[in-house]
Image (cartoon, rainbow, N blue to C red):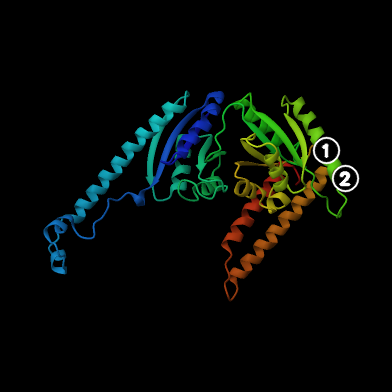
Amino acid sequence: MRVLAALDDSDLADEVVEALAPWLAAADAEARLMMVWDSRQAHPETPTHPPDLIVSDPVVTSDSWARAPVDYVGDRNERRGQMIQRIRNERLASLRSLGARHLTSTFDVEVDGAEDVPEAILRAADDYGADMIAIGTHGRRGLRRVLGGSVAEEVIRNARIPVFVVHQGSVVHPGAHFLVVAHDTARSVELREHLEDIRTRDRNAQFTLLIPATHHSGRLTDTTDDVATAESTAAETRAVLRDEGIDLADARVGDPTPLLAIEDELRDHPDTYASVILCTFPPGISRWVRMDTAHQVERHLEIPVEHVIAYRAPADNPAARDEYCQRLRHAADTARNQLARIEALSEGDVGIALPAREHSLNDELEAIERALFESGCG
């Protein structure tokens, strides 16, 4: 197996490789450490006037500009080429040192300068024959600032292979404790596989399950049934995971609002959790996604969040599966109708364009269609 690690020249590169190292060792995989930089930024500092005139003419006039050496532009291009080569050499050396510090598995290094950084990463992954891309994100606001821009968003959107994202400050060490937050998706295949993957990389990892006592529609004040349902879900999930070889440290019920439930848990158990694992249904049918729960937790509680989406319908409950498929179909129809309305607005006399909303709806529809396919909803 091959992994392309797309890195920048910040401290985040260390965290990406450190997070990747145990996984590479466990999977007996090899890696290529690649540093990509915007080639448009590779130019020498340009003085206001040709260098020789700054020394020879205390007062630079239009006449002195006219006397500028003919080969000044050529010199500048030569200096630009020298700067590019120096950047390459420095970053190749940095990557070799980075790999030597963290990796025991086979690795090589590559440096590339390109105007379109996401495209360069995807092209490099294809040329390398990578089975996965690893990339880092600055800050705790999802994928908004990566490698100096929205690079990870573009890579994730267009990659045809899995993308392993490392949030700055989220590198965890052996024996880390994870807070797993879910409700109807608690027994999903995707969540179980995610926990198994963590255990594969770290046999000492611990998990605590938190089930928010989410209100059901039509119930205004009586929360007794909500709490009972959450407690039952917690107990059943704990038993299912135990049968799969994953023993939970604990399983608890929390506030109906997931953000408040997580906040209560972090306050009651400070400095316990390395990150939150949030499992939801796909966008379009998930209330937690509509509430922007993952980003809200990262922003307000300052803890990394791993968002796991449960695409597949419950296999052991035909009635629940039918309801899930029905909700997906309705969400797909809603998204298509909204996209048609946006297209009509853009083609009207006024020509109103809503690119951000159109992009969001297309992503949502793609997730819904994937869920329909993986659930066999037809």
- For label 2, the crowd category at 10 Å Cα-Cα, with few meaning under 14, some 14 to 19 and many 20 or more, is some
Does residue 365 lie above or below 108 as drawn?
below
Residue at 26% in and 55% down: 46
Q: What residue type is labelled 1?
A: Glu
- Looking at the rendered structure, the secondary structure element under dot 1 is helix
Does residue 328 lie above or below 135 as drawn?
below
- Which of the numbered marks, if any, corresponds to residue 308? none
- For label 1, the crowd category at 10 Å Cα-Cα, with few meaning under 14, some 14 to 19 and many 20 or more, is many
Q: Where is residue 377 in the image (x, y as percent from the top left)?
A: 76, 45
Residue at 69% in and 31% down: 207
In the image: residue 24, left or right of residue 340: left
Considering depth in this image, is 106 or 209 the residue closer to the camera? 209
In the image: residue 122, left or right of residue 358: left
Q: Where is residue 265 in the image (x, y as percent from the top left)?
A: 71, 40
First in residue order: circle 1 vs circle 2? 2
Q: Where is residue 218 in the image (x, y as percent from the top left)?
A: 86, 55
- Which of the numbered marks, if any, corresponds to residue 225? 2
Q: What residue type is labelled 2?
A: Asp
- Looking at the rendered structure, the secondary structure element under dot 2 is helix
Considering depth in this image, is 308 or 365 the residue closer to the camera? 308
From where the camera sits, is residue 129 visible? no
**Which residue is denoted by mark 1 in the rendering?**
231
Residue at 43% in and 45% down: 120
